[in-house]
Image (cartoon, rainbow, N blue to C red):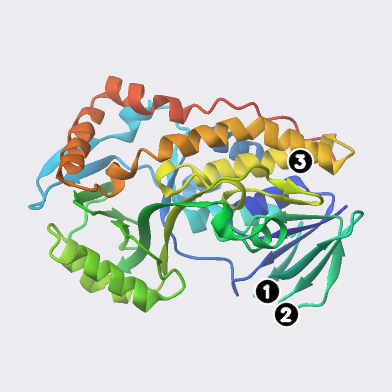
Amino acid sequence: MQTLIVGAGIAGPTLAYWRSGHEVTLVERAPELRRGGYMVDFWGAGFDVAERMGIVAELRRRGYVLKEARVVDDAGHRIASLRPAAMLGNTGRYVSIARSDLAAAIYDALDGGAELILDDTVRTLTDEGDRVRVTFEKGEPRVFDLVVGADGLHSRVRRLAFGPDGQFERYLGIVVAAFEVKGYRPREELIGMMHAEVGFQVVRVPLRDDVTLFLLSVRHDGPAPVEDRAAAEALLRRALAGGGWETPAILDVMPRAETFYFDTVSQIRMPSWSRGRVALVGDAAACPSFLAGQGSALAMVESYTLAAELSRCGDHVEAFARYERRLAPLLRSKQDAATNLGLAFAPKNRFQLVTRNSVMKLMGLPKVADMVMGRSFRDKVELPPVAAA
């Protein structure tokens, strides 16, 4: 069965891995596999998929086990201290890793098992009932048995097969930026520093080779310049003007960053994740938003489950339906929970800021952390077996 997977981030290569034995083509509109982006905390059912792929050791090599997430005030004084080991227990089933490094580890596991087309994407999709005719922006037209959109929040496949973004995207009023700078000081090894004020949060995390990752989440109304770095930097400067702690210094080094990620914090809510011979996975299907903190792991779970259902069902329609029935309740619960977390990433007002800092203090207590966060670390989902091709 010839399958086209659009998007070579996390969901796409995961699906390609589990579809080994079939003819799989990955197409990615970027000229190279993506670099940069923010760091994700990787745990839960996504960790189970990584174990089945045999990549956990590589994720540990590329990732980090932070000792502490420290919340500080304008003067840099500690407000709260969150320790992942205390929140998760010493299970070893947790790692912080850059999204691009997670994607690279998954792609490397493919070991040439899929055709990769870079610097191109789909232009049109025509579902003819027994096949999908695809035209590309640059390449020659081709025909596939199935097309899967794994092309993220702003999915081209979703727009072509299901309709405009506005039907499905729910913007949560926040934008997020991530960039890396070498040689920034001060620096605390394996400690993530967090500072919030009304309207924004600034995070810095030390990486290897004297690199520091900065993650900014900012309240913003109206259109966001997601394709224009200069305009995005200008937006951040306006929004963070007058900010305390290290905010001015972070804005000063921002232009030095070689990679710069900027996007809206949005969710995708759809009545169905498939239509005919076209299906969606990952953020393209059910983005829980940056606030949920599990988008990458959930994308792997979705791709694995879709591959499992395709492997056990002779009919793609049945496989698509079973895939959605298995995962839709979990994804909707993650989305619902995330809608209430905006105050943690960009408090709207002084009351929310005080509430956020108070909750952070309580989260430093292991029993409280487990009560508040414990369920999210233990996804209630059964991963079906993948039949041999």
Question: Which one is in front, 110 or 6?
Answer: 6
Percent of width and height locating residue 333? 50, 32
Give the residue at mark 3: 320
Q: Is residue 377 above or below residue 172?
A: above
Residue at 21% x, 63% y: name it: 240
Give the residue at mark 2: 138
Of all residues shown, which one is farthest toward the front?
Answer: 167
Give the residue at mark 1: 120
Q: Residues within 10 Å of mark 2 (few under 14, many from 20)?
A: few
Q: Is residue 194 above or below residue 135?
A: above
The amino acid marked with disc number 1 is Asp
If you read the primary sequence from the N terminus, does the residue marked by circle 3 or circle 1 appear first?
1
| Alpha-carbon span between mark 1 and mark 2 | 6 Å
Q: Quick one: SS at disc 1?
A: loop
Question: Which one is in front, 131 or 202?
Answer: 131
Percent of width and height locating residue 368? 28, 22
Question: Which one is in front, 79 or 270?
Answer: 270
